Amino acid sequence: MASRETLLKILDLARWAPSGDNTQPWRFEIVADDHIAIHGNDTREWCLYDFNGHASHMAHGALLETLRIAATGEGLAASWQLRPGSPDKSPVFDVKLAPAPGIAPDPLLPFIESRTVQRRPMRTTPLTAVQRSALAAAPGAGYSVQFFESGAERRQVAGLLWRNAYLRLTCPEAYPVHKEIIEWRTRFSKDRIPEQAVGVDGATARLMEWVMASWGRVQFFNKYLGGTIAPRVQLDYIPAIACAAHVLVKADVPAQGVEAHVRGGIALQRVWLTAASVGLHLQPEMTPLIFRWYARAGLSFSAVPEIQQGAAALADEFERIGGFGHDQGLTFFCRVGVSDPPKSRSLRKSVEELMLPGR
C-alpha cells in the first residue's frame, strides 16, 4: 500500500515530536506496508517528573499526532490503537495507514520540524484575537483553555514557578535527573538538552556545571551561597513575566489510564504546533502540574518532609490562582509569546537509531 520509503519519510517527521527532557521514549517497527508499531517505554523508574508514566504517555500521544499529521502529506490517513495487553510501562501502539483520496495536507504539517522550546524571555506583546482563538480551539473536544495574560496574572504565575523551582532544585530525588539531562558546552543535542538551550548566561552555566557534578556541592551552594537564586531568576521568574501569556489546558474529565494521557499528549502537541503556526514560541511549565499530581494522589516523591509539604502547598496555590478545585483535570501548562527563534535546540535521534533492531 505504501512503500517503505514513504513510511520512513513519515517516521522521519514523526520523530520530531516533543518528549520530557528529550528522552524520546519510543522505538519504531514497520510491520507491513500499512502498519507501523510504536513501542513505547516510560522513565518513571529514574525520573520523578514522570509520575506514573504520565509524562511519557503524553509524549507517546504527541508522537502519534505528529505521525498522523505527517501521513496527510503522503495522502494517507493514520489511525492508532493501544495494543491489548501491552503493559503500562511499555505500551505498544498499532498505527494503520490507509489511502485517503483527496485528503489535504494538515495545516500544521509545515511546523513539525521547526516547533521547538523557547526558554529565554519573550516579548510581552499581547496575544491577538486570532492567536488566542487558535490556541483555545487547538486541543479539541474534551478540553478547555485558560489564559493568564495580564501583568498581575503573569506575576502570580511567576511567583508560583519561583517557589516550584525551589523544590525542584533542592529535592535530592530530582538531582540525578538534573545531572544527566543537560549536555554541557553544546548548542545542539540529539538526546538531551544542550547547554545553550537551557536559558542561563555563560557564567551561570559554568557554575551550574561545576556545582551539579555532585549532590554535596549542590547542598553546600543551596544552603550557604543562595545556589538556587540565579537559576530561578533566569529560568523561572523572568521568563514567566517576559511572555504574552501562560496557557493552561484543562481536561473536562480527569485523565485515567494510558489512553487518556495519550490523548492529553495529542492535545499538547496540537497546542504547540498551533502556537508555531500563528507566530508564537512556547515553553512547557509542567512542574506545577506534576507536583500537584503527586500531592492530590497522596503519593510521596521525596524523603524530605519539607518538600512534600511544599508540593501540597503549591498545589493549593495553583488552584487558588486558577480558580479551580482539587478534582479539576489539568493536562498542559505553558507560556507563549513572540521572540526570535532560539539559536540552540534539542535535535533527535535518527530514524535508524529509533528503529527496533532488524526492523
Image: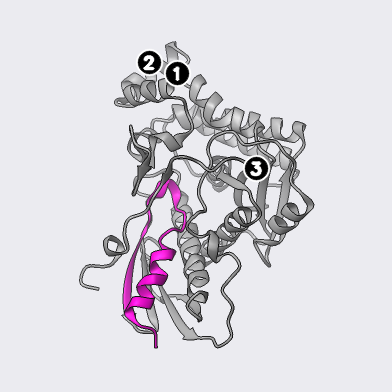
Q: Is residue 39 left or right of residue 145?
A: left
Mark nearer the viewer, 3 or 2: 3
The picture places residue 76, in percent across and down from the top left corner, at: 49, 81
Cα distance, mark 1 to mark 2? 8 Å
Q: Is residue 227 magenta?
A: no
- Residue at the (55%, 24%) spot, across then down: 233
Q: Label 2: how many residues lie within 10 Å, few (<14), some (14-19) or many (20+)?
A: few
Q: Residue beneath label 1, please? A: 227
Q: Is residue 5 left or right of residue 160?
A: left
Q: Is residue 276 above or below residue 294?
A: below
Q: Residue beneath label 2, please? A: 220
Q: Residue beneath label 3, please? A: 337
Viewer-closest of 78 and 343: 343
The amino acid beneath tag 2 is Phe
The picture places residue 80, in percent across and down from the top left corner, at: 48, 76
Cα distance, mark 3 to mark 1? 29 Å
